Amino acid sequence: MKEIYQKLLSDIPDYKEFLTVDEMNESSKILAMKYPECVSLFEIGKSRNDEPLYCLKIGNGSHVGLMFGCPHPNEPIGTMMLEYLSIKLAENKELRESLDYTWYIVKVWDNDGYRLNENWIKGPYTLYNYSRNFFRPAGYNQVDWTFPVDYKELHFHNSIPETEAMMELINKIKPEFIYSLHNAGFGGVYWYITSKTPELYAEMREAANKQNIPLNLGEPEAPFCIQWAPAVYANLGIQEEYDYLEKYGVKDVAKYMICGTCSAEYAKDLCDAFTLLTELPYFYDKRIDDMSDAKILRKDAVLASLDWDEKASKFIMDTLDSTKEYTRKDNPFIQALKAFSGEETKMSNDTTRKMVEVNPDYLRIASVAEEFDNLYVTKFYKLLSYGMLIRAHEYELDKMIESNESNQEKKTALEKAIDIATKEHKKLADYLENAIDYEVIPIRKLISIQLESGLLVAEYLKQK
């Protein structure tokens, strides 16, 4: 790697917290004012709450790159990478010329959703605080999963405003390289890429190794992921999920799929763009990359996870059902919970059950990493839904206060649901705090892995 890139990586500050939307917007405005010769700031559109979506344009290289943070609003690691990189690009002409890209940078794509996560982004970074203040929208409200698509019986053309804004930008600039800055909550490092690039796999894994952060070698995040190498997967569009469900006997697949496809698929079809995703965790446990044998079949670990998930989902849906006459259809937390714990999730779990019964790879002994993923990490992700279950009812109480609504029966029902959800959330949080020997990863290390992976791909694409 070039010396100038090595210095870029070594100079990453030791950030102690993430920035708010307002802090990032203000930083971008100052950067454009300070470096008008190479930086401009413009709106690409508005959010659903009518907030401006800002994009920085930096440099004037012969290649075109697009980078965006918070395609999911609970994933701010990429926003900090973009905050750091945008400043360095503006300050350093030699860096801009060495990269030879014109960069388009959207620090926060989902402004509205990110604001609903701002109660945890300043810490403390614990499983309890993260989950208690967490928000992630339902798929049909996710900015990176409402791109239009026509595939078999699936026809989706109901893009939300943030997606339309990004589509227009992609249509205009036709990027060669897209860096979609996601991150996971728990686990290890892994990557999604548009096409096989075996020349880069070892270097990408070394970027994680240098920071002493393990690879994610447990279960993939979806059973239809295509693995090209350890911790390296093919990018996913909605088509892969459709084919998987169809293969394992789901009838009328399209009726369950109420979202669209993603930016990677859209830009690949439009201009043959290459998209990289570098998935990083906030928390990790050393078991996540332990490939030694566990004492359970992989199939049994998966089935145990599904059984537990269905009981937890039933608790969530029963609690929502108990207050349904008092809640709004536009409550974002309820929309998300129904997507993550309702009929669609049950259908997905049933499909996975069928798959593990016929797929011979699930008849072997699980690795410790796979066992850990199934028995603990899945519970961590359900903990996030428990947090949103509390917030769904707090949201309704807040609306009552805002409108001066006086309805004691409604207030009592909402408070009862909050009490029930709070107890279950705390019980599961306490269990996980004891069962998982986790560490909180310094933000600086996460930025380093994400930035180095991006530099490797940006350089690789210039050689093609």
Image (spheres, helix red, strand yellow):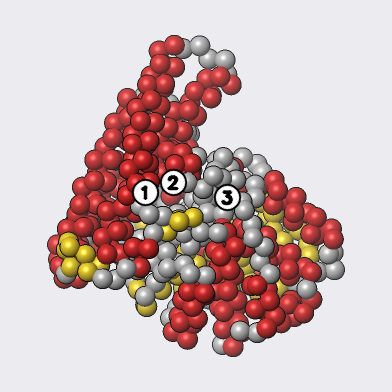
- Badge 2 crowding class, 10 Å Cα cut-off, few under 14, some 14 to 19, many 20 or more, is many
User: Which residue: 22% across, 57% down?
Assistant: 302
Residue 243: percent from left, percent from top: 30, 64
User: Which residue: 54% across, 74% down?
Assistant: 453
Front disc: 3 or 2: 2
Residue 240: percent from left, percent from top: 35, 65
Q: Are marks 1 and 2 in contact (CB under 8 Å)?
A: yes
User: Which residue: 56% across, 54% down?
Assistant: 76
In terms of depth relative to the viewer, which is nearer, 284 or 25?
284
Asked if residue 362 shows in the view, the reply is no
Q: Secondary structure at mark 3?
A: loop
Asked if residue 29 shows in the view, the reply is yes
Disc 3 to disc 2, how far (Cα)?
Answer: 23 Å
Q: Secondary structure at mark 2?
A: helix
**Residue identified by numbered label 2:** 127
**Residue identified by numbered label 1:** 380
Residue 333: percent from left, percent from top: 45, 37
| Residue 357, quarter of picture | bottom left
- Which label is found at residue 110? 3
- Badge 3 crowding class, 10 Å Cα cut-off, few under 14, some 14 to 19, many 20 or more, is many
- The amino acid type found where label 1 is placed reads Phe
Q: Are marks 3 and 1 in contact (CB under 8 Å)?
A: no
Quadrant placement of the C terminus: bottom right
Horizontal arrangement in the rendering, residue 324 relative to residue 303 (left or right): right
- The amino acid type found where label 2 is placed reads Leu
Q: Secondary structure at mark 1?
A: helix
- Badge 1 crowding class, 10 Å Cα cut-off, few under 14, some 14 to 19, many 20 or more, is many
N-term-proximal mark, 3 vs 2: 3
Horizontal arrangement in the rendering, residue 280 relative to residue 171 (left or right): left
